[in-house]
Amino acid sequence: MTSDRHRFEITVENRQKRIRILRPRLLRRVREVLARLGWKRAGLSLLLVDDAEIRRLHRRFLGQDRATDVLAFGQQEGKPFPGRGTPFLGDVVVSVETARRAGPEYGNRWDEELLLYLCHGILHLMGWQDSTPAQRARMDRKQQNLLRKVLGARWRSKNRKLLF
């Protein structure tokens, strides 16, 4: 899906050591998600952590003392993206530990579950909200559509209660 017309600057910091991350596959999938969302150029920072670290971040920045699956920290704060250069969307923090635990519960591999969390975070960076049932349903439809396009028939969307 990505081509020479796409320019993505994605940094990945893996702070957890329990689960091996295949960085080339992860980057390829994230680039495809960005391209399918209409981005030609974008910068993005991905932080892969364990449950303990995401809990600390969740408590520090959102005041909730519990682990979660994904946190997103946007750089634009609702302002339009600048027209020149590569727009930096922000930071997405995901718990690899949560993805490994939750993926099989829904019939998916843990790395596919991780991509769900990344899609969710990227949509938040683009301004999508999930505060109301209608917003959650709209965002879920968008995520499911993206995952079916990126992962194909492997993606299984069972009814799930998301932590987001």
Image (cartoon, grey):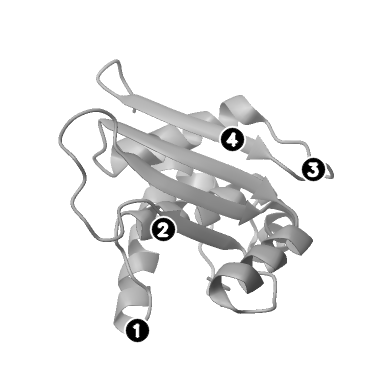
The Cα–Cα distance between marks 4 and 2, rounded to whole angstroms, is 24 Å
Residue 155 visible in image: no
Q: What's the amino acid at mark 1?
A: Thr
Of labels 2 and 1, earlier in sequence is: 1
The Cα–Cα distance between marks 2 and 1, rounded to whole angstroms, is 18 Å
The location of residue 56, given as percent across then percent down, is: 70, 66
Q: Residue at x 73, y 43 (%)?
A: 15
The answer to whether marks 4 and 2 mark residues whose Cβ atoms lie closer than 8 Å is no
The answer to whether marks 4 and 1 mark residues whose Cβ atoms lie closer than 8 Å is no
Secondary-structure class at tag 4: strand
Residue 57 visible in image: yes
Secondary-structure class at tag 1: loop
Mark 2 vs mark 1, foreground winner is: 1
The answer to whether marks 3 and 1 mark residues whose Cβ atoms lie closer than 8 Å is no
**Apparent side of residue 52 relative to residue 148 in the rendered image (left or right):** right
Residue lying furthest right in this view? Answer: 18
**Apparent side of residue 69 relative to residue 143 in the rendered image (left or right):** right
The Cα–Cα distance between marks 2 and 3, rounded to whole angstroms, is 25 Å
Q: Residues within 10 Å of mark 4 (few under 14, many from 20)?
A: some
Secondary-structure class at tag 3: loop
The location of residue 154, given as percent across then percent down, is: 55, 46
Name the residue that disc number 3 marks.
19
Where 139 falls versus 13 (above or below)? below
Quadrant of the image containing the N terminus: top left
Where 90 falls versus 95 (above or below)? above
